Image: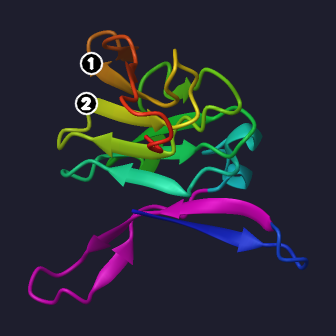
Amino acid sequence: AVGYSTAHENGQAASEHVAVYVLTSPLDDTSWSLLGDAMAAAQGLLTADQEMGGGVVTLSARGGVLAIGSQDGAKNTVVLLQWSRLSNSWEGLGTNNVLEGESSSSHFGASLVLNKEGTRLFVGAPGAPGSSNVGKVFIYQYLELENEWKQLTDPIPSLVAGDGM
């Protein structure tokens, strides 16, 4: 999974996109193909608030779950998508597949990690307010029966001020 940006004529980022590529031949590690379409706000997979998403992406080890961070967007969000073999496209995973940060300056989604199954997500927010230190890690679990993402614990605060966590 890769995130990339497109630019306006004046050099400012117009939007960022996400694309997922798969190895098409196990014998030749140079043959890759696009899985589904490249995603952007204009295609309806990301909303206008998440248009700056794509700078940070993570894909589960099994390749079926994708998290896209939009920490520079208006709302500091993470969008969770699942690959559907039936529709041959990426679809929202869970009824609450858009997770939001605490504030616009939290940079929620600056770092993302999914477990291999794509059911547990760690979200870094280096600008999230804390007691004396800045930065937090949020941990979410996907609950299949409820079809939703749930925050597991209180956010884990940074141990050292200014560590960029």
Q: Secondary structure at mark 1?
A: loop
Q: What amino acid type should be assigned to the residue bearing mark 1?
A: Glu
Quadrant position of the C terminus in the picture: top left
Q: Is residue 23 left or right of residue 16?
A: left
Q: In the drawing, what numbered circle is on residue 119?
A: 2
- Residue in front for this viewpoint, 144 or 164: 164
Q: Is residue 67 visible?
A: no
The residues colored magenta run 13-39
Image position, residue 74 (x, y; %): 75, 37
Q: In the rendered structure, are the residues bearing label 2 and label 1 in contact, judged by CB atoms less than 8 Å apart?
A: yes
In the image, residue 137 above or below residue 117:
above
Other-residue count near label 1 (Cα within 10 Å), few / some / many at <14 / 14–19 / ≥20: few
Q: Determine the image quadrant of residue 39.
A: bottom right
> Residue at (63%, 35%) from the top-left corner?
76
In the image, residue 139 above or below residue 44:
above
Q: Determine the image quadrant of residue 46.
A: top right
Q: Determine the image quadrant of residue 116.
A: top left
Image position, residue 142 (x, y; %): 30, 22
Quadrant position of the N terminus in the picture: bottom left
In the image, residue 114 above or below residue 131:
below
* Foreground: disc 2 or disc 1: 2
Image position, residue 90 (x, y; %): 45, 47
Q: In the drawing, what numbered circle is on residue 144?
A: 1
Q: Is residue 23 magenta?
A: yes
Q: What amino acid type should be assigned to the residue bearing mark 2?
A: Thr
Mark 2–mark 1 Cα distance, whole angstroms, equals: 9 Å
Query: Which residue is at the far right?
Result: 10
